[in-house]
Image: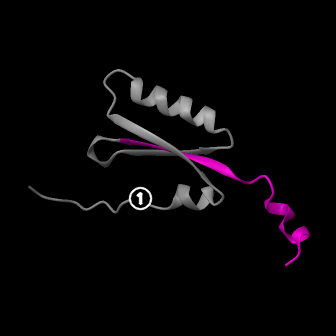
Amino acid sequence: MSDTDNTEFIGTEHFVLKVYGKHNLMFKTKHKDPDYLKKVGEEMISQKDTDYTHYEVHFNSEANEEMTHPETLLHITLD
């Protein structure tokens, strides 16, 4: 494959924000600006009475795939 065959993928890189919370709560989004995602993460965990506890921002050239990939499988438990 030549370099010209990859031109359609140039500029598709994104960063992914994952905000984690209590009870397996997770929020995911992507953006090209990691500083913007950090700001969103900070705002989400700093809200009053939030269930979000921490966040991470990382680079992923396959961000679309990560956005649709389930993080965990939910299992119903009857107590």
> Image quarter for residue 62?
bottom right
Describe the colour scheme in one phrase: one colour
Q: Residues within 10 Å of mark 1 (few under 14, many from 20)?
A: few
Q: Is residue 5 left or right of residue 14?
A: right
In the foreground, 79 or 20: 20
Please report the residue visible at 40 percent of the width from the left and 46 percent of the height from the top.
26
Extreme residue toward the left, this view: 79
Locate residue 47, reporting x and y percent: 39, 23
Locate residue 12, reporting x and y percent: 74, 54
Q: Is residue 5 left or right of residue 78?
A: right
Decide whether residue 57 is among the magenta residues: no
Q: Which residue is disc 1 drawn over?
A: 71
Against 36, residue 60 (above or below) is below
Please report the residue visible at 55 percent of the width from the left and 34 percent of the height from the top.
38
Locate residue 13, reporting x and y percent: 70, 53
Q: Secondary structure at mark 1?
A: loop
Q: Which residues are magenta?
A: 1-20
> Image quarter for residue 45?
top left
In the foreground, 65 or 1: 1
Locate residue 46, reporting x and y percent: 40, 24
In the foreground, 13 or 75: 13
Extreme residue toward the right, this view: 4
> Type of residue at label 1?
Glu
